[in-house]
Image (cartoon, grey):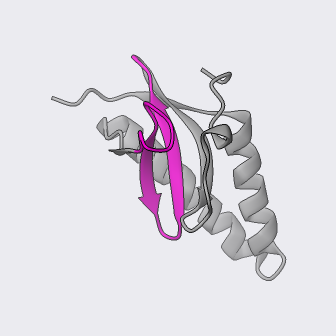
Amino acid sequence: MIAPRRYRLSRDAINDLIDIYDFIAQDNPAAARKFVRSIEEKIKSAASAGYTGVARDWISPGLRALPYHDRCIYLRVRKTHILVLRILHGRQDLSPGDFPESDS
């Protein structure tokens, strides 16, 4: 059985949400609020259901990903919570340096 978890957002993930909002809000602030809220709900729902995404060890050992629309929510699974490291566009080039270990 998959255990439900809480979630935390790293500083980078919070900044990613702000960047997503700012980009969309240039054209449509209401749509920006709605999309950012929907990302937060996806994270909350996945954590409470115990869903921890799919492995992305080829980017960084222990990294997991939840695809959502044209974004990807990158996280690490901890004993009691999931730590959301980044929320990036699905076509963005990635490297291990995009996922710091300091926000555990």
Q: Quadrant of residue 20?
A: bottom right
Number of marks drawn: 0
Which segment did they paint magenta?
Answer: 56-79
Give whichever of 61, 10 is nearer the camera: 61
At 32% from the left and 29% from the top, the residue drawn is 4
Image check: 57 left or right of 104? Answer: left
Nearest to the observer: residue 54 or residue 33: 54
Quadrant location of the C terminus in the rendered image: top right
- Could you say where residue 59 lies in the image, as x and y percent from the top left? 50, 44
Q: Nearer the viewer, residue 85 or 26?
A: 85
| Residue 84 percent location from the top left of the image | 56, 38
Q: Position of residue 86 (x, y in %)?
A: 62, 45
Q: Is residue 54 left or right of residue 90?
A: left
Q: Residue 83, image x and y in percent?
A: 53, 31
* 79, above or below 41, in the image: above
* Residue at point 48%, 46% (across, down): 43
What residue sits 27% from the left and 26% below the top? 3
Let me know if residue 14 is in the magenta part.
Answer: no
Left or right: residue 49 versus residue 29 is left
Q: Quadrant of the N terminus?
A: top left
Residue 60: within the magenta? yes
Q: Splitting the image into 4 quarters, where does residue 56 fall?
A: top left
Q: What is the residue that sits farthest to the left in this orientation?
A: 1
